[in-house]
Amino acid sequence: MAEKATLILDGKTYEFPIITGSEGDKAIDISKLLKETGYITFDPGYVNTGSCISAITYMDGKKGILRYRGIPIEELAEHSTFVETSYLLINGNLPTPDELAAFSGLLNDHSLVHEDMKTFFSSYPRGAHPMGILSSMVNALRAFYPEVPERSQEEELNLTVARLLSKLRTLAAMSYRISRGHRVIYPSHELGYCANFLNMMFDSPVKPYVIDYDVVRALEVFWITSADHEQNCSTSAVRHVGSARVNLYASISAGISALWGPLHGGANQAVIEMLQEIRDSGGDPRPFIERAKDRNDPFRLMGFGHRVYKTYDPRAPIIKKMTDKILTKLGRTDPLLDIAQNLEELVIRDPYFIDHNLYPNVDFHSGILLRAMDVPVNMFPVMFAIGRLPGWIGQWMESMEDPDRKLCRPRQIYLGPTLREYIPRDKRIQMKENGEL
């Protein structure tokens, strides 16, 4: 007999099915709650609400577990490539050698962007944030690559996916170079996905970029650990917008906009800005730690703690290991990096942060890694967006294939005025003069 949850309201008893996930997580199916009882649930931020059933990513915040399609993030970071991981998230399984070769070839074939897109870039103010530009450019891709009726739906989707995965990195590198007044570097068929991006970002006629494959691997691991994270803010935005049956470009554009926020994809940028604030205040992180512990002070340490993880973020040690390797190899001396190391050592020994499960998260270490790789701070969220793209695509595709899909339309509890009459404009003037408004 299937498990059910019992709810008693106004003297009446209702039963609702219990859904059990493949990892044992449970949910009460309240999809018929309003219809049967007249009530809705109230759950700000959807902290306790499951918005969908998914087979893509599994997280356990208490145990610090993250898996893509059942494969632990630690194994993917150790053995996989970003392109292979992207295929896994989008298609459900790791590719065969032939499938991977075909997928990689498709990405290479679609890496160039239309030359007219430079005109779009040139119209943006030089001070525009790269995330705002990127969101607009992705939306514009639809106009440059409209659907062809002769293609099957599957062919069209495969091409759209390849375009997005390949062109997003090209657009990101292009936006960076144009913002600096430098000529655009085109993708090379001789370089892999990550090496190509670094070359497009940093190559110069006066100082050719030398590919360091340890740095390439560091970027690859960063993107693998960023590739999906269950129903986070930006992924939920992609699904939410996609539920209106808009095209994939528009849904991904919405995801980029959501990721831009400092509490989400902008968190690693916020880490560096916090470290700069500590440096400008003398370099001692201890006063900032004390401020973070003061409930009456709105200041918070960026890069510590996580909305879901109540233990170490499983991605954090992966990125920390890669960061330490790159810093040692490159021999970088940077006051911010010294401050970050000192801050981390103080926090992980502080009983307050231990008791409150405020451990260094992936944003703390990834901000330091990207800085060591000479990525400008305002490009940090863009780097995150490139990594998160395959997860967004996989989630959008899954939602489109869901036989129970519905237009996302949350409810609310209304606390505004009750019924009142319309007051004519002349009477409002008179009432205001009389002090009645």
Image (cartoon, rainbow, N blue to C red):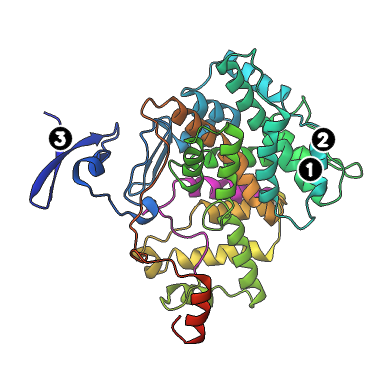
Q: Secondary structure at mark 2?
A: loop
Q: Magenta segment, which residues?
A: 300-329
Residue at 11% of width from left, 28% of height from top?
1
Residue 353 image offset from top left, x and y in percent: 40, 66
Residue at 82% of width from left, 35% of height from top?
116
Badge 1, how many Cα within 10 Å: few under 14, some, many 20+?
few
Residue 161, located in which quarter of the rendered image?
top right
> Does the magenta segment cover residue 311?
yes
Mark 3 or mark 2: name the one nearer the start of the chain: 3
Q: Which residue is mark 3?
A: 3
Q: Are marks 2 and 1 in contact (CB under 8 Å)?
A: yes
Badge 2, how many Cα within 10 Å: few under 14, some, many 20+?
few
Q: Amino acid at mark 2?
A: Asp
Circle nearer the viewer, 3 or 1: 1
Q: Which residue is mark 2?
A: 116
Q: Amino acid at mark 1?
A: Phe
In this rendering, is residue 68 above or below 344? above
Q: Which residue is mark 1?
A: 120
Residue at 52% of width from left, 63% of height from top?
302
In this rendering, is residue 227 above or below 365? above
Rounded to the nearest whole Å, what is the CA distance between mark 3 and mark 1?
56 Å
Whether residue 85 is visible here, answered yes or no, is yes
Mark 3 or mark 1: name the one nearer the start of the chain: 3
Q: Nearer the viewer, residue 332 or 233?
A: 233
